[in-house]
Image: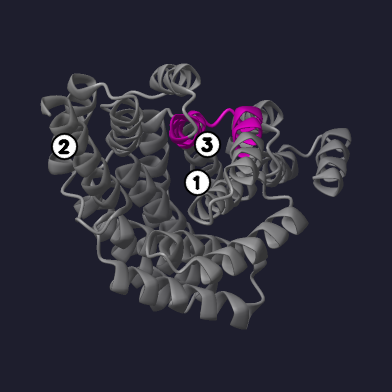
């Protein structure tokens, strides 16, 4: 970011708007990855004003970058608009790399809004475009993202195989970003399967790579994954440290979706320790961060956490109500029974029924 910032400053001194736009786009992306969101937004906005002088390709790159920024901030419709415009521009100038980037972004936005069928189709279109262009970088990256959607759909075996393909391509090409992303996803899948030793090893490798790369968003996701593994190992104090570190970083990134997710896991941790007031505060705070219409998956996970909190507190009606809310979202999403949401719903349904049986006795 420092080196690219010097290029931006030099281009302005030379009054070279085309170079300033190109450098500003790259700088904005670097700042966003480092978690400096406000600076990233300012750089991308400034670059967008100069993009006309830089040509159609830079304009399309800026649209992808703005789409990514809007998505992280939770503005999904704005994000989708940027990606759609970028895809149209990529097709017009016949640029296969930009086409991959735009399709990958559209698929990610569809995944965020719970349209898993559409997300899978768009990721497969991006994958086909990458392979047709012989672009191994995008092939590996899209495979990793496709694996995440397959997991959301409950197709764990296919998801793991797809992510392993991504990992192999990333390692062959020396791409540390996609490699760490694949390791993060594998760690999450193995944690859900109870393969905890594998999960911790993969998550620790991903965490180390994320910190070397300065990839703040990936770092906070991996921290949460490690917290989940530590809860499974019966180490709540260490888990809480990781959850709180992840939450602090997500707040710095202004990523409302991740904040919501981490608060849900903190609520679960507090409830298992008998701290029900703290657990309910986490649920309340998390509820203000997302819009169920724009991010139903996150809303479904939060209702599962709420159901667990109330079941552990012995609040039968509240637990059953949260389960029904989560089940409705699960059904509307078409998520598979082996997806993270599906597994969470199975668990809390049993807990709520147990609480109900105890109440009746």
Residue stretch in magenta: 246-272
Is 181 on the left-hand or right-hand side of 114?
right
Mark number, residue 66: 3
Residue drawn at 53 percent across, 36 percent down:
69
Mark number, residue 353: 2
Mark earlier in primary sequence (1, 2): 1
Q: Is residue 162 above or below residue 242?
A: below
Which x, y percent locates residue 149? 32, 57
Q: Badge 2, how many Cα within 10 Å: few under 14, some, many 20+? A: some
Magenta part, dominant SS: helix
Q: Is residue 280 above or below residue 9?
A: above
Residue drawn at 81 percent across, 34 percent down:
15
Mark earlier in primary sequence (3, 2): 3
Q: Is residue 92 visible?
A: no
Kindly indicate whether the residue at mark 2 contacts the one at mark 1 (C-beta within 8 angstroms). no
Q: Which of label 3 and label 1 is nearer to you?
A: 3
Mark earlier in primary sequence (3, 1): 1
Which x, y percent locates residue 161? 37, 77
SS state under label 1 = helix
Label count reads 3
Q: Quadrant of residue 151?
A: bottom left
| Image quadrant in which the N terminus is located | top right
Is 205 on the left-hand or right-hand side of 121?
right
Mark number, residue 345: none
Label 3, label 2: how far apart the Cα atoms are: 46 Å
284 or 54, which is in the foreground?
A: 284
| Image quadrant in which the C terminus is located | top left
Label 1, label 2: how far apart the Cα atoms are: 52 Å
Q: Which of label 1 and label 2 is nearer to you?
A: 2
SS state under label 2 = helix
- Residue receiving disc 1: 60
């Amino acid at each position: 970011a420092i080196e690219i910032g010097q290029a931006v400053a030099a281009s302005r001194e030379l009054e070279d708007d085309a170079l300033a736009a190109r450098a500003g786009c790259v700088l904005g992306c670097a700042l966003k990855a480092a978690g400096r969101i406000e600076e990233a937004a300012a750089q991308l906005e400034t670059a967008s004003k100069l993009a006309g002088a830089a040509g159609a390709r830079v304009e399309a790159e800026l649209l992808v970058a703005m789409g990514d920024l809007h998505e992280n901030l939770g503005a999904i419709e704005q994000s989708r608009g940027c990606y759609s415009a970028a895809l149209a521009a990529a097709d017009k100038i016949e640029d296969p790399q930009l086409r991959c980037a735009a399709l990958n972004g559209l698929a990610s936005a569809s995944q965020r809004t719970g349209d898993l069928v559409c997300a899978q189709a768009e990721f497969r279109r991006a994958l086909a475009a990458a392979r047709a262009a012989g672009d191994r970088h995008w092939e590996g990256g899209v495979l990793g993202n496709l694996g995440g959607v397959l997991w959301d759909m409950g197709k764990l075996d296919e998801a793991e195989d797809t992510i392993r393909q991504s990992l192999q391509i990333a390692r062959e090409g020396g791409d540390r970003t996609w490699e760490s992303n694949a390791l993060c996803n594998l760690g999450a899948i193995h944690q859900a399967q109870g393969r905890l030793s594998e999960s911790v090893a993969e998550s620790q490798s991903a965490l180390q790579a994320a910190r070397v790369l300065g990839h703040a968003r990936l770092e906070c996701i991996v921290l949460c994954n490690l917290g989940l593994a530590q809860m499974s190992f019966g180490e709540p104090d260490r888990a809480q440290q990781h959850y709180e570190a992840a939450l602090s970083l997500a707040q710095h990134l202004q990523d409302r979706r991740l904040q919501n997710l981490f608060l849900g896991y903190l609520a679960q941790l507090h409830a298992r320790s008998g701290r029900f007031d703290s657990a309910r505060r986490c649920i309340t705070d998390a509820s203000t961060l997302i819009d169920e219409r724009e991010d139903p998956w996150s809303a479904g996970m939060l209702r599962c956490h709420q159901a667990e909190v109330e079941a552990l507190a012995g609040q039968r009606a509240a637990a059953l109500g949260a389960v029904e809310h989560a089940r409705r979202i699960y059904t509307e999403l078409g998520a598979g029974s082996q997806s993270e949401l599906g597994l969470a719903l199975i668990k809390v349904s049993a807990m709520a029924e147990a609480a109900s049986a105890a109440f009746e006795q």
